[in-house]
Image (cartoon, helix red, strand yellow):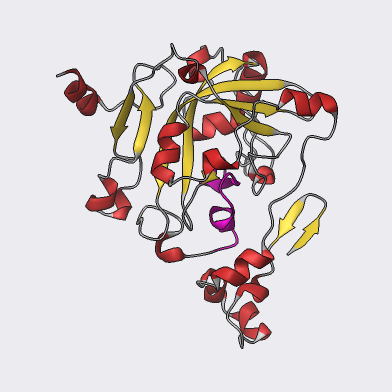
């Protein structure tokens, strides 16, 4: 794999089965989505490196959770992430913090709703096959980003759906009021927002793309490790201090009906009961919890 000024480029030819002619790689796009040799891929792919180097940066991220925290099955990680604090350090030193309140687990090759169903590997989803704790940010609908973290198990990971803001809310609101990169007019000019919106705190990052916008996360940050990157890490929250026990709602994931009824109904979405920053509550499940 080539590394060029902070961007990782995947050499697809090196990941295809031996004997594949280079010309066919260029002419047949289907080969780019082929299942490739897993061991070869592991030897080729590396996480992007940008660790804390100064004593100030190291002290700031001293409480980050390490590899062992992420090295568990995706369903376990999705539940364990609830109540944890996600810390984002911007290039100018600004700190943004939020409590993770909603997640979804994706189980890899067996999961019809996963991008890695049947162990499919593409240039986009490669981070899901990288070591646990690898960040995977992808673009959907041409303008909305979604933030994931890989877990134990080939192609498995967790989508972080919502955070409850803790620190840096003014900066988050400023980011939320910027025009989206993909929202251009017919003339190719970014569409300005009609007027700045005064967000309530719980509205700043109460959804997958809202979280990415508020925390300035994009595809530029994919393949970094939450275990080492100076720009983002995860810390323990109050639920680990003894008094902050949280109640978790377990329900079906959102927007995956195309995966079929079996997988669409699997309870692989998790959220903190009663938190206003959750993107969408499941009234039926919550009613059952109160019975």
Of the pair 82 and 69, the residue shown nearer to us: 69
User: x, y (%) of residue 32?
Assistant: 57, 71
Q: Quadrant of the C terminus?
A: top left
User: x, y (%) of residue 60?
Assistant: 74, 23
| Vertical placement of residue 12 versus 130, above or below | below
Residue plotted at (62% across, 15% down): 169
Relative to 290, is 111 on the left or the right?
right
Residue plotted at (43% across, 14% down): 244
User: x, y (%) of residue 94?
Assistant: 74, 21
Of the pair 10 and 129, the residue shown nearer to us: 129
Relative to 19, is 93 on the left or the right?
right
Relative to 267, is 14 on the left or the right?
right
Of the pair 218 and 105, the residue shown nearer to us: 105
Residue 34 highlighted magenta (yes or no):
no
Which region shows up in magenta? 122-148
Total labels: the figure holds 0
Of the pair 217 and 89, the residue shown nearer to us: 89
Q: Can residue 19 be seen in this view?
A: yes
């Amino acid at each position: 794999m080539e590394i060029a000024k902070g961007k990782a480029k995947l050499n697809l030819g090196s990941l295809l089965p031996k004997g594949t002619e280079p010309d066919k790689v260029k002419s047949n796009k289907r080969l780019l989505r082929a299942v490739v040799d897993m061991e070869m891929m592991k030897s080729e792919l590396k996480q992007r490196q940008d660790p804390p180097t100064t004593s100030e940066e190291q002290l700031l991220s001293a409480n980050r959770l390490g590899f062992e925290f992420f090295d568990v099955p995706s369903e376990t990680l999705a539940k364990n992430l609830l109540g944890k604090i996600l810390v984002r350090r911007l290039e100018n030193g600004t700190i943004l913090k939020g409590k993770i309140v909603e997640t979804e687990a994706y189980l890899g090759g067996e999961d019809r709703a996963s991008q890695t169903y049947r162990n499919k590997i593409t240039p986009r989803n490669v981070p899901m096959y990288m070591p646990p704790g690898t960040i995977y940010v992808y673009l959907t609908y041409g303008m909305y980003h979604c933030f994931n973290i890989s877990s134990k198990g080939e192609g498995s990971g967790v989508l972080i759906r919502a955070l409850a803001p803790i620190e840096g809310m003014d900066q988050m609101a400023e980011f939320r009021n910027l025009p989206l990169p993909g929202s251009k007019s017919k003339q190719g000019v970014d569409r300005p927002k009609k007027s700045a919106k005064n967000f309530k705190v719980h509205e700043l990052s109460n959804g997958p793309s809202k979280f990415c916008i508020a925390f300035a996360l994009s595809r530029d940050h994919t393949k970094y490790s939450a275990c080492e990157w100076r720009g983002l890490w995860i810390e323990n929250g109050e639920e680990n201090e003894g008094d902050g026990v949280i109640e978790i709602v377990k329900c079906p994931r959102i927007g995956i009906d195309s995966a079929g009824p079996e997988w669409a109904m699997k309870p692989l979405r998790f959220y903190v009961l009663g938190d206003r920053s959750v993107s969408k509550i499941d009234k039926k499940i919550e009613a059952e919890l109160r019975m």
